[in-house]
Image (cartoon, helix red, strand yellow):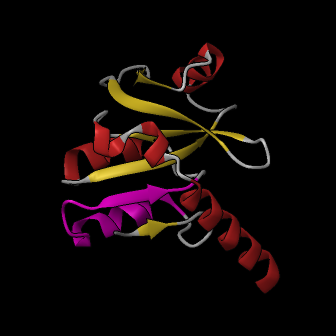
Amino acid sequence: MLLIYEGILTSAQEAKALVPHIPKGGILLFDRGYPSYDLIDYLIRHYQGYWVFRCPARSTFTAVEDFVQSGKTEAAITLAPPGAKPITLRAIRMESPDGGLSVLLTNLPDEPRFAAAAVISKKPINKWQVDKAKRIADA
């Protein structure tokens, strides 16, 4: 598994450069700042594995904002930028312990081993919080 955190890599282009070196079948985790139609489309075409993007709940894809407004815990949503092929993804609502809201965009199938409750377990949230605190302490 490869973890790509906000701030360590400076762009989606660098993430794309790593994909050919990642063994197939893993789960890639991308933090806020990485969700883009271009990167998601690239992963669909070039990575034989799973991926999860933590996406902000506001100022993001219209489909994500509509999902948040729906109040659903999870749903299939479609990103459809003008002039591009629509992409259907799984969206999962994720509330952090401090009450913040994010949405996970993923290609993980909706099956028992990838149930929403398992995907949003507190472990990834805590990991992101630890890394954020470490970056602040190192500054």
Q: Quadrant of residue 77?
A: top left
Q: Is residue 112 magenta?
A: no
Give the residue displayed 76% in from the left and 73% down from the top. 133
Q: Where residue 97 appears, x then y in whole percent? A: 74, 49
- Magenta stretch bounds: 11-31
Residue 59 showing in the rendered view: yes
Q: Quadrant of residue 87?
A: top left
Q: Where residue 67 appears, x then y in whole percent? A: 56, 20
Q: Where residue 73 appears, x then y in whole percent? A: 54, 26
Give the residue displayed 60% in from the left and 67% down from the top. 127
Q: Where residue 100 appears, x then y in whole percent? A: 75, 42
The relative height of residue 125 versus residue 35 in the rendered view (above or below) is below
Give the residue displayed 61% in from the left and 32% down from the top. 60
The relative height of residue 90 versus residue 118 in the rendered view (above or below) is above
Q: Is residue 24 magenta?
A: yes
Q: Nearer the viewer, residue 35 or 83?
A: 35
The relative height of residue 78 versus residue 53 in the rendered view (above or below) is above
What residue occupies the far bottom of the structure in this picture?
138
